[in-house]
Amino acid sequence: MVTTLTDARRARRIAEQVPDPELPMLTLADLGVLRDVTLAADGTVVAELTPTYSGCPAMAEMRAGVAARLAQAGYEHVEVRTVLDPPWSTDWITAEGRRKLAEHGIAPPGPAPRPSAGPVPLVLSTTRRAVPCPRCGATDTEETSRFGATSCKALWRCRACREPFEYVKEI
């Protein structure tokens, strides 16, 4: 049974190290989907996760990974909850997570879009944004597909070094 603040901190450190099933170079903490790890009054470890997307297919694996790691560490009673409010944002990816993405050839996202106070403007053409190539750093890049291997990534190509790369979309 978990009863002390030290146990809660230890449980959090363990949960923070669980790798993301789709981006295994990142931990759930790096990605910002691990929201909290607390102790319930009965000693149950409660971990809260927020999916990157509604209906994220990796959530079942994330929950199972957190529960398994905590059980392996000796925590008998573990509950993993999905928390949807507030929704996950790419702003929650840590600096370490962004570094790891770039190190593995995936362009980290820029700041998440901010909602405007007024009406949504009508835009008839695509808005060009600079996505730096994670390999050479050039900003002369182009999106080749809005949809990548997972719903949180798009496919891009660098015009300078000609290499394709994935880009984590801003949310």
Image: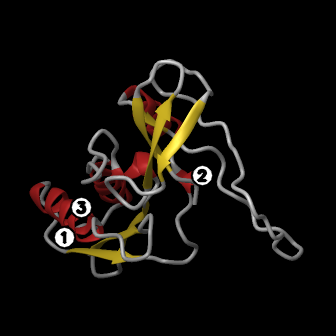
- Local crowd size for mark 2, using a 10 Å CA cut-off: few (<14), some (14–19), many (≥20): some
Residue at the (33%, 62%) spot, across then down: 4
Q: CA distance from mark 3 to mark 2?
A: 22 Å
Where is residue 136? Give x, y as percent.
50, 18
Q: Quadrant of residue 33?
A: bottom left
Q: Are marks 3 and 2 in contact (CB under 8 Å)?
A: no
Query: According to the image, label 1 marks what residue?
Result: 1
SS type, badge 1: loop
Q: Is residue 110 shown left or right of residue 55? A: right
Q: Closer to the camera, 74 or 113?
A: 113
Q: Closer to the camera, 47 or 87?
A: 87
Nearer-N-terminus badge (2/1): 1
Which residue of the protein is positioned furthest toward the right in this rendering? 118
Residue at the (43%, 75%) spot, across then down: 54
Q: Quadrant of the C terminus?
A: bottom right
Q: Are marks 1 and 3 in contact (CB under 8 Å)?
A: no
With respect to residue 56, does 127 lie above or below? Answer: above
Res 91 label: 2
Q: Quadrant of residue 44?
A: bottom left
Where is residue 76? Give x, y as percent.
13, 70
Query: According to the image, label 3 marks what residue?
Result: 66
Q: CA distance from mark 2 to mark 1?
A: 35 Å
Q: Mark 3: which amino acid? A: Val
SS type, badge 2: helix
Q: Mark 1: which amino acid? A: Met
With respect to residue 157, does 138 lie above or below? Answer: above
